[in-house]
Amino acid sequence: MAECLIVGGMLIAVRSTWAASQSALAQAPPVRASATNSLLTPVVGESWLSHLNRPFGDTSMGKTGRLGPPPSSSGEEPPRGQAGGLAGCATQTTSLQGADLYRLNCRGCHGEAGWGAPPEINSIIDPVRATSVPLVLERMKKRGIDMSRAQATQLAQQAQAALVQRLHNGGKEMPPFPQLQEAEIRSILAYLRQLASIPGAQNEQIVVSESPVRVGELIVKSTCHICHSAAGPNPSPEQLLEGAIPPLETLPTRKDQSGLVQKVTQGAPVLMGAPLMLSRGRMPVFYYLSPDEAADAYLYLTLYTPSELSVLDTVATTLHPLQSPGQPHQGGTAPGARTGPGNTPAELPQPSSRAETQYVSLFAGLGLLATILVASGLSFTLWEFRRLSSRNESHALAVLSSCMDTGAVGHAVVMKQAPCRAVSGWSRRRRPEQPFTNEVGDLARKNKRGGRQCSGTRIG
C-alpha cells in the first residue's frame, strides 16, 4: 500500500513538472538563430599547408592572384608593434548575408565565382547544382536517362547531405570548418545555390547577425590559418627570405592595427634578408576584405592569443559576448578569463534558459520515479521470498513431526512381533526388509507353519 502511494505521488509530481515546462516553452519567445551567441575560441594548431606538408609556392590555396605594391611606391615600412586603440566595439553587431560569409570563409581558395583552381581546388558549382531536383532531372534528360521526380529528389537530398558533411568535416585537400554554426552554414549554402544559378535561390537568402570579434574569428580560422600556423617562433628577416611564414600569434607584435589593415587589404613591403632591405613579400592582398573586417581580425588576435595546443581549457578559451567598456563587471574576473577592450573582463557563461531548466527538472523527476519503482519492486520481491520461505519451513516441520510420530508407532509394533519372528523358520527365510503384517490371524498362521507355536504373544 505504501509503495502505491509513493508511486502515485511521483506520477502527480512528474505531471506537474511536465505541465510547467510546457507552459514555459509556450511563453518563451522564439529565438532567432544568430552567431552572436556563439562561443569564441582561439585559433590552434598548425596551418593547413603544414598539415598537408605543402610549400607555399606549390599551392593555390589562400592566394588571390594579387600582390602588394613594390617598395618604391610604398615609402617606408609601417611601424610595427605600437600600442593603439582598437577600432570598433566588440559588443556591436553587423548583419552578414551568405555572400559575406562566403567571402570570409571560402573565397580565399574557391575564388569569387566558386570555380576553384583545378585540379588542386575543385569547383563547388557542380556539387551545389546536384542539390537541385529540376537541375538533376534536366541533366539526366540530356544524358538520355529516364528518371522519376522521386528518384531525383532522393539524389538531391544525398548531394545536400554530402555537401553539408564536407563543410563540417572537410576532405583530403579541404580543411574542416568546425567553427561554422548551423545558421552560418545555411546562409552559405543559400548563397552557393544562387552562385550556381539554381532557380528560386535568390528568395532563400539568410541574414545572420555577427559581432566584430566573431567576424575576425571567421577570417582568421578560415582564411589566415590556411598559410599561418597558430603559434611558433617569430621568424627573422633572413628566415622570411628563405620562405618562413610568421605565426598568427606574432602578427599583433609585427604590425599595429593600421599596419595590419594595410597589409591585408592593400599590401605593404616587409624587411627581408641580410642586409635588410624592403621587399614586396609573398603575402597576397585580400582586396575583397574591407578595412573594418581586417580590423576585426586584428581585434580577435589581440583578445584571443593563438595556441599550439589542439585541446584547451574550456574556462580559459571560452568567451561569450563582451561587455561594453562602461559596464561594471560583477563578481570579479575568473582565472584564465580574457579581457575585452578597455580591460573589461569577458562575461562568464550564462545559465541555461527557463525552458531548459524545466526539462532538466522533468528528466530528474522521471529518473527518481524509475528509481522508486525499481526499489519498490525489489522490496516486494524480497518480502515475498521471505514469506514463502517461512511458510515452506513451517510445512516441512509439520510433515517431519507427523513422520516421526508414525515411525514410533511402527517401531513399537515391530518390536512386539520380533519374538515370534525369531522362532519362525519361515521368517528366517524371508528378507529382513519385508514388512510384517499387523493382523493377529495371519501372524498365528505363519508361526504355526514354522513348526512352533508362539504362546503368550499378544499384539497391541
Image: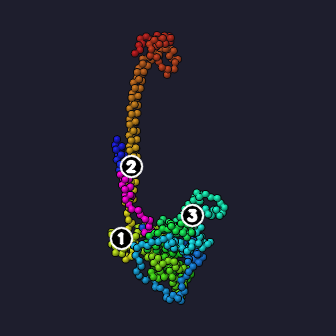
Q: Look at the image and tell me in which quarter the N terminus lies.
A: top left
Residue type marked 1: Thr
Q: Position of residue 374 (x, y in %)?
A: 40, 46
Looking at the rendering, which quadrant does residue 299 occupy?
Answer: bottom left
> How far apart in space, not on screen, are marks 2 and 1 (Cα)?
41 Å
Relative depth, front residue between 206 and 37: 206
Q: Earlier in the sequence, mark 2 or mark 3?
A: 3
Question: Which element is circle 3 on?
Answer: loop
- Residue bearing the label numbered 2: 369
- Count of numbered tags: 3
Which numbered disc flags the more N-terminal residue, 2 or 1? Answer: 1
Label 3 – label 1 distance at C-alpha: 51 Å
Indicate whether 426 appears above or below 15: above
> Of discs 3 and 1, which sits in the foreground?
3
Q: In this picture, is 418 found above or below 216?
A: above
Residue at figure coordinates x 50%, y 16% from the top left: 427
Res. 204 in view: yes
SS at circle 1: loop
Mark 2 vs mark 1, foreground winner is 2
Residue 377 picture location, percent across and down: 40, 43
Residue in the picture at 40% in, 49% down: 370
Query: Which residue position is annotated with label 1?
Result: 333
Find disc 3 in the rendering and name its residue: 132
Whichever of callouts 3 and 1 sits on the residue coming sooner in the sequence is 3
Q: Is residue 239 visible in the rendered structure shown here?
A: no
Q: Which residues are magenta?
A: 15-36
